[in-house]
Image (spheres, rainbow, N blue to C red):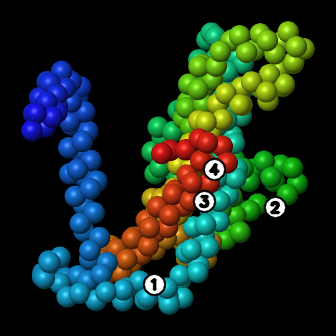
Amino acid sequence: MKDKKIKKKSFWAQLKRDKALILIVLPVVIHYLVFIYYPMYGNIIAFKDYSPVLGITKSPWVGFRYFIQFFESPYFFRVLRNTLLISVYSILWGFPIPIIFALMTNDLKAGAYKKLVQAVSYIPYFISTVVVCGMLVNFLSPSSGIINSIIKALGGEAINFLMEPSWFRTVFIASGIWQGFGWSAIVYLSALTGVNPELYEAARVDGAGKLRQVWHVSIPCIMPTIIVTFIMNLGTLMSVGYEKIILLYNPVNLETADVISSYVYRTGLVEGNYSFGSAVGLFNSVINLILVFAANKISRRVSETSLW
């Protein structure tokens, strides 16, 4: 009994001591509870024949009907293939670029030029997706776009990039890298500022040039950050955003442009098949969760660095 009273007093003493910190964190906790965790209750409609009139609780239970319907759908392999290819190519090409950019920027001397380079690289991240897609339509226009003007000036023929299914992934991934590499590099630049300068001095004394300093000092020191970021990217492998896809796709390039998120939008919201759309979205989330756990476990065994 005494131990319980002591623990209780200790708990309230700690609570009183840390009340300022708790008040700071409380709005964030409430936000997650209300807008992230509470809406998860709505996933139950994936297992029901949901009707807005009947509501979630009174709609009839159908089990895995809509999951089976999705697996048997002629669009299943198409949207799964496109989602995986776009995500894998985005990680393959887009993941190293912020790291390389951070390593290059880190070597610049502090001053106006370094600030200008960083500012120019950050700006695209804050451009609206709608504006970016409008820029792509204008730049890639076969008649007046700057890209095709350069191709024709070099003696080539104009390419209608947005009407060619084979070009969609390249356009989507390249524009995504351009828009996000500067912002993503902030994490690595922050990690590089924590590297002990004495390590670089020791490397220079041993005769290491710039490249060897990067390879043997910079990269190993930020490797934990790289691994954690990579695990988080794997967790979104199946989560290609639908906004940019919908703004760029059309009936001609749909074969390579349609992904799970755009399929959920089209079937769930546009066609009003809420239960089917929820089932597809829940399948997508479960796969992402499995990927995060698998990547974290592998990383912990190989490098002893992990999210948890």
- Indicate the secondary structure of the residue bearing disc 1: helix
Residue in the foreground of this view, choosing between 66 and 305:
305
Q: Quadrant of residue 268?
A: bottom left
Residue in the foreground of this view, choosing between 152 and 269:
269
Residue type, numbered disc 4? Arg
Task: Say which residue label 2 marks.
Answer: 157
**Disc with the residue nearer the chain's start (2 vs 3):** 3
Question: Is residue 302 visible to us here?
Answer: yes
Residue type, numbered disc 1? Phe
Residue at 27% x, 47% y is 32
**Disc with the residue nearer the chain's start (4 vs 1):** 1
Task: Say which residue label 4 marks.
Answer: 301
Residue type, numbered disc 2? Glu
**Disc with the residue nearer the chain's start (2 vs 1):** 1
Tag of residue 87 = 3
Task: Judge the density around disc 1: few (<14), some (14-19), many (≥20) Cα neighbours within 10 Å.
Answer: some
Closer to the eye: label 2 or 1: 1
